[in-house]
Image (tube, rainbow, N blue to C red):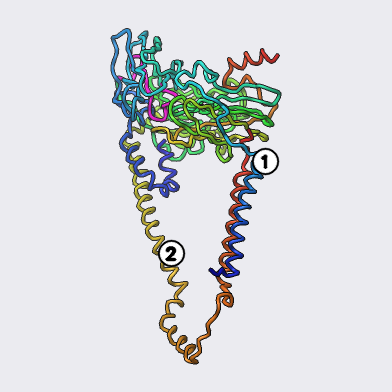
Amino acid sequence: MEIHRFEKVWVACALLLIVGFIATITYGAVGAGVAMVNDEGGTVDAQNLQDTEFADPGVRQVGANEYEVYVVAQQFIFRPGTNEDIVLPANSEVTFYITSADVVHGFNIVGTNVNSMAIPGQVAKLTVQFDEPREYGIVCHEYCGAAHHEMAGIVRVVPESEFSMADTAASDTTAEEDGGDA
Amino acid sequence: MNADRSVGPTRRAFLGAAAATAGLAAAGSATAQEGGVDFGGWFDDVDNYDGVVDARGQSEVTVDVGAQGNGGAFAFGPAAIRVDPSTTVVFEWTGEGGQHNVVTEEGVELGSELTDEAGFTFEHTFEEEGITTYYCEPHRSLGMKGAVVVGDQGAGPVQLGEPDYGDWFADVENYEETVDRRGQSEVTVEVGAQGNGGAFAFEPAAVRVDPGTTVVWEWNGEGGQHNVVSEEGESFESELTEEAGFTFEHTFEEEGVTTYFCEPHRSLGMKGAVAVGNVGGPAAEEGGVDEAFANRVFGAFGAVLGLLTLPVVAGLLYIYVNRRSYQRPDEGPAIEAEGTGKGTVQKLTHDEYDPVGTAALVAFYFVLVSLLWVFMYFVEFLGNGPTVIG
């Protein structure tokens, strides 16, 4: 079989392109530090969330600039997120623990790469760095029932000077945790 | 509400295709005043609302939480009840439809646990006359809403709709609806209330009073100097002052609507109105809905027509631009005959022929794919932080 020299060139180009794709993704994971959401978060009993860390979901401070946010997705709210905003300080490293109380939901901070499914019984653990004060929307992007289109929330990243743990959702837990830290 | 509907049809008209069904729904529930109580549209999206259930004369009334309705077990049954003062309302969870709770929108503070336990109960004793509206947080958007009417209010004459203010309130942030203060001989309006980006509001912005009622404007001293100047209707003008506690009054004798404003802050939306007597009403409201509905239908029709026209226009344009190539079949054979007329057909070997055009096209595709990849991965994906880093 004869292969025209032009064809040889573009077969080589195509292979080069594939190598390029793989290289960029490798760069994203190694260089830019983009992580995938995996099963690291572990599992919980979706029927008895009141016996888990999700009993009183909300923001908890775990270090100087480190916070944990427990979020329960359920038909048709994010708790917290929908009825009260998730308030976080700028320049903080935040680990979200997200699970569902009923059916499969989605958790996407709109316009960003913070994106996960919320599966009953499974905890999605994802760490995010928030640099600038800004308000983000949260949407559920997995069809979850009649009012799926209404299921949304807000993450509000405020300047560090304006942030106080007293304003956050899980006030009870916060008080205990603060006591422990002090 | 009326003003809003009739002012903003232009943008909606274009979205009309999608909104036509919504328009039908809105037309179907123009007035939510059965049972004589005006819930201000609270029950517009509540399927199982069917008037106010009269439970007066009972000391304890049970409301099911998670009753059938609103596309599942997402209802309070019954949605609206009327009870006597000092009645205990027991909310009883059916255990269906997932987790529910009872949270007050307006009125007496209620706040139950969020649970899906069948048989769970939450109760409250309503002492005072008034209306309390409540909802279930997770399912509010589905229409899981309810109300408790305490006492006989509204059981009598039918409430009126909004008077026609034109677009007077279009830029007044703190205006929601006309506050009904009929039956009082003196009504107070706060001057310098919070609203319109500062202390630049009349509170309430619109009141309905009986003829012969004296309206007293009371300055609270905030937001700088204010005054009260009538625009249309009865004529009055107050002093311009910022003194807290200063009052100005006017007695409204005639039925009708009087609009007024604060001169220094008119452009900010510091405007108000007094509706005297039974002006306005359901007739005006229906007119507004019909007009809006007509606009939506027209918009939907226009949108469909536009979509149908688009491919036709595109097709005609394509033919026009390429009109020369359509003539080729006629000229073509002549040229070919000329070429072959010489009688020699040169045979090219495989590598002698250079498909330069194809190569250019392939090169263009490569460049395009590479650019799109760079744009997608580096700009859209990595550029839109924050990103999951662990």
- Amino acid type, residue under disc 1 in the picture: Val
Range of residues picked out in magenta: B134-155
Q: Nearer the viewer, mark 1 or mark 2?
A: 1
Residue highlighted by disc 1:
A30
Instruction: Tell me: residue B122, above or below residue B178.
Output: above
| Residue B378 drawn at (x, y percent) | 63, 48
* Label 2 crowd bin: few (<14), some (14–19), many (20+), radius 10 Å: few
Q: What residue is at 62 percent from the left and 52 percent from the top?
A: A19
Instruction: Tell me: residue B322, above or below residue B18.
Output: below
Query: Given the image, what chain letter belongs to the residue carrying mark 2?
Result: B
Q: What residue is at 48 percent from the left and 38 percent from the top?
A: B170
Query: Given the image, what chain letter belongs to the residue carrying mark 1?
Result: A
Q: Closest to the observer: B81 or B289?
A: B81
At mark 1, the secondary structure is helix
Residue highlighted by disc 2:
B314
* Label 1 crowd bin: few (<14), some (14–19), many (20+), radius 10 Å: few
Q: Point out the residue furthest to the bottom here.
A: B342
Q: CA distance from mark 1 to mark 2?
A: 47 Å
Instruction: Tell me: residue B169, above or below residue B35.
Output: below
Q: Is residue B135 highlighted in magenta?
A: yes
| Residue B8 drawn at (x, y percent) | 44, 44
- Classify residue B214 by image quadrant: top left
Q: Report the number of discs.
A: 2
